[in-house]
Amino acid sequence: MNALTGLLREWMPSQRWFGSKGREWAGVTEESFFLDRSHPVLSIHRVTVTYSDGATETYLVPLSWRDHPAEELSAALVGTVPHENGENYAYDAMRDREATATWLTHLAEAATVGPMRFVPGEGAEIPAGLPGDVLSAEQSNTSLVYGQEAILKLFRRLEPGLNPDVEVHSALRRTGNPHIAPLLGHAEIDHDRDADTPPATVLMLQRFVPNASDGWRLATASVRDLYAEGDLHADEVGGDFAADSERLGAATASVHADMAQVLPTEEADRDWFNTVARQMTERLDAAIEVVPQLAEHADGLRAVYAAVAENPEPVVRQRVHGDLHLGQVLRTATGWIVLDFEGEPARPLAARRELDSPMRDVAGMLRSFDYAARHMLVEQPGDQQRAYRAQEWAERNRSAFCAGYAAASGMDACGNSPLLRAFEADKAVYECVYEARNRPHWLMIPLQSLSRLTAAGQRGEPRT
């Protein structure tokens, strides 16, 4: 193992974008090339990790290099590598502002550098020459904001094939949909050892959305306003969020409609319903091993899933967002923008590109409203007054979202749909596993939701 590979093996597991924390490494290999030989030197590394169970993952790691330490980059230091005249200092290039303009320069020039090809969007105005500032809140990717002009997302985990985020944004750009940030370009990288393997998407560049507010922050601020007004209902509080929720529902329906227009669709057959029900049941069985508290809901959940297999409602499968929640939307002065169409990054790329029901996205947003309403109950789980008000806020905003979706789509998104109920329940089961592993004190939120979902399913009632 060379010095750089050893450094990467020590450094990568501590990065937020590294998705396999805690897994035992059996080996690691690294392939690299130079993207820029000016100052600082910028190199691109494909690091393939082999785990003790035989699985492998490949990550993209850009590094900037200096022949002396840069004090202002101490937090971005990966380590030092010896050479004949001393040491070279390696830094995380996405956090090295001097190294960030290179991406836009190559994209504006439609350059090919080594195995990497830069593909600007047709007619796109790329702000070449601007340095970028890294966003710190992301988990699986790394993004740079270039002034008020553009935002670049670097996909850390590489998989062969076009990333859904690029594919969907490219298709939606043709529709002129007002609820997306236009795609300005992307880059891809060839597989070094197999010409038949499709290139992996490395990055995408979109127009930046200035003066926008994160949906989760707006929604939770509304909940705090409600809790502060002990004698007012949700519709009487100055921070009422229902009008925004209704507009968000309409925006979601608009995006779904345009995705169906420019990307493939297919009528769902009985095999698809059976497969969905079986996969949900399998995920539940696996989740019970992690969260034993799920066992008391198991019979009710299996009944909810079984209803999907017997579901008579017609469903047109299409491309969907795949991971829609309040943190994936921005409110601007003119409306809502939907972000991040790559789906759940932990799922294989092929699975994220499969056709699905738009109700999966609706269910994700309904679960997000429930989280926004109840996350402040975690610190005061016995406060019945707050619990009542949380339920009132959640019902009001979930209903408003569905009303907006129905008005824009002509489809009753919150009717008595066995499929939507099952999608919600499946999402809540996933949340239980996530909370048990990461935030055990939040586990009460999805568990309480499962009580309502299974009870409503047994009575045949709409979700609340």
Image (cartoon, rainbow, N blue to C red):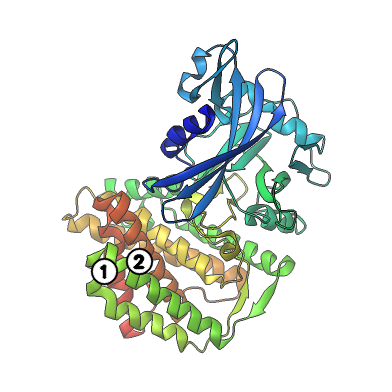
Image position of 90 with respect to 117: above or below: above
Secondary structure under tag 1 reads helix
Q: Nearer the viewer, residue 175 or 432?
A: 432
Secondary structure under tag 2 reads helix
Name the spot of residue 272 as percent of width and height, x first: 55, 81
Number of residues whose C-alpha sits closer than 10 Å to that of mark 2, classed few (under 14), some (14–19) or many (20 or more): many
What residue is drawn where x is 52% and y is 13%? Answer: 69
Query: Would residue 326 be found to the left or right of residue 338 on screen?
Result: left
User: According to the image, label 2 marks what residue?
Assistant: 429
Label 1 amino acid? Leu
Image position of 266 with respect to 388: above or below: below
User: According to the image, label 1 marks what residue?
Assistant: 294
Tell me which numbered mark, 1 or 2, is placed earlier along the sequence.
Answer: 1
Q: Are marks 1 and 2 in contact (CB under 8 Å)?
A: yes
- Can residue 328 be seen here? The reply is yes
Name the spot of residue 451 as percent of width and height, x first: 27, 71
Q: Nearer the viewer, residue 157 or 388?
A: 157
- Can residue 377 be seen here? The reply is no
Image position of 61 with respect to 251: above or below: above
What residue is drawn where x is 51% and y is 34%? Answer: 1
Number of residues whose C-alpha sits closer than 10 Å to that of mark 1, classed few (under 14), some (14–19) or many (20 or more): many
C-alpha gap between disc 1 and disc 2: 8 Å
Name the spot of residue 367 as percent of width and height, x first: 40, 62
What residue is drawn where x is 60% and y is 24%? Answer: 64
Query: Would residue 400 be found to the left or right of residue 147 on screen?
Result: left
Name the spot of residue 210 as percent of width and height, x first: 61, 37
Label 2 amino acid? Val
Quadrant (top left, top right, bottom left, bottom right) of the C terminus: bottom left
